[in-house]
Image (cartoon, rainbow, N blue to C red):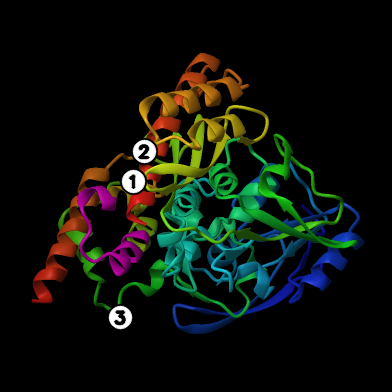
Amino acid sequence: MAKIHVSTTINGEPTEFLAAPQQSVLDVLRNTLGLTGTKEGCATGDCGACSILLDGTLVCACLVLAPEIEGKQIDTIEGMATGDQLHPLQQKFLERAALQCGICTPGVLIAARALLERNPDPTESEVRFGLAGNLCRCTGYDKIVRAVLEVAADMKEAAR
Amino acid sequence: MTDLVYLSPPTLDEAVRAFAAAQGAARILAGGTDLLVQMRLGTVRPGTVIDIKKIAEMTSIEETADGGWRVGAAVSGAALADHPRFGTVWPGVLEAVNLIGSKQVQGRASAGGNLCNASPAGDSVPAMVAAGAVVTVQGPNGRREIAVEAVPAGPGRTNLAPGEIVVSFTLPPRPANSGDAYLRMIPRTEMDIAVVGVGVSLTLSFGVCTAARIGLGAVAPTVLLVADAAAALVGSSLEDAAVEAAAAACRAACKPINDKRGTIVYRTKAAGVLLKRAVAIAAERARNA
């Protein structure tokens, strides 16, 4: 079957790949491009483990067909740190042990960053609703929510 | 899913031609939050997928010259929420669209897809029905406009003719002191399928309700326009007796199923309760509009 040639930008890097039309972006990221930070949980858009940004919008990579990202900008967990400098959310998740098995963590981080970019000073309820699309099978939600709120508070303090 | 053909035509005419040429073997791809799941589960096996998101008319939001709105069928819930004005004029429609799934799903899911998926529990549909939205469809025989409530035919089925594609929703100009609201009942607090959904849109003039539309979801094979409920409100000052009469009309319109989410008795009772709450919210918005 003929594969489709796709040109896109992933974490700021121009990237080209060949994909079958029915392949998901998640499949391409993990199995064609070796970007395995984006995880597969359900593959039906329910769990959020494959959260990425598509032109700045939070989406599930499992529910985007590979040819759909032609000419688009993709941001994945691999682009979250700047070199060795972890993103404040990543740093806080480590400090506060806001992860257990870690499978949901990349998706949670991507979703949390998207949340704070839109709403830098969220209430606890807003964080919980904002991350409701990210399931943690270890059920470690409380530490996740508290870590996100702490980062928001740190950002607010730093902005003074 | 072998031999899938992916097309992303830049114009509606090309999309309509490709859709017709596929003779029923193609599916329209908007946000994909239903279609791609169905394809993965094997419940639909299209030979061709036609991505309509490169068509400007499908992805744009416009305020029309008469003060109405035109929302492209593939506009995502996130894009609608980002519009600076839409949510101030039609907060109920926006709430309904933004109740569909998680933030991730809202980044993709569209009102056009929600309508064409034809679930009786689709959240955006009762709000669009209440808003009096008219759907523009285009097919091999040209363009036509139909009321949104005329689109669903039953669970998973629409009244669209073969080859027709939903292009946009047109919402009418808003008179002063109008408000809308959408509420749904779900067993959880977030991200679930409606047991009942109620959309209300109304207009007040010196405290008297001069126009109303009620859309009722998840309690019948299709979303319903409940004209009797609207009639109970129009001419009233939304006093308790009038709102109770509207609630009774909603309960009478219910033809629900028993399932794991709710029994017939529960859904019917909840329809009346939600109607009253949604009327209160819509009225408050109308007073402040």
Residue type (three-letter) at the residue carrying disc 3: Gly
B136, B42: nearer the viewer: B136
Q: Disc 1 marks which residue? A: B284
Specify few, some or many for label 2: CA neighbours under 10 Å numbering under 14, 14-19, or 20 or more: some
B268, A120: nearer the viewer: B268
Same subunit, labels 3 and 1: the answer reads no
Whether the residues at callouts 3 and 2 have beta carbons within 8 Å, the answer is no
Q: Disc 3 marks which residue? A: A83
Same subunit, labels 3 and 2: the answer reads no
Residue type (three-letter) at the residue carrying disc 2: Ala
**Relative to A66, does residue B41 appear above or below in the rendering?**
above
- Residue B226 in view here: no
Q: Disc 2 marks which residue? A: B280
Residue type (three-letter) at the residue carrying disc 1: Glu
**Left or right: where B37 falls relative to B123:** right
Question: Which residue does the image show at 57% across and 71% down from the upper left?
Answer: B62
What is the CA distance from the residue labelled 3 to the residue labelled 1? 52 Å
Question: Which residue does the image show at 26% across and 71% down from the upper left?
Answer: A87
Q: Quadrant of the C terminus of chain B?
A: bottom left
Whether the residues at callouts 1 and 2 have beta carbons within 8 Å, the answer is yes
Where does the magenta region start and end? A111-127
What chain does mark 2 sit on?
A: B
- Residue B288 in view here: yes
**Left or right: where B287 falls relative to B27:** left
Q: Look at the numbered disc 1 and give the secondary structure of its residue.
A: helix
**Residue B146, which numbered label?**
none
**Relative to B64, does residue A137 appear above or below in the rendering?**
above
Q: Look at the numbered disc 3 and give the secondary structure of its residue.
A: loop
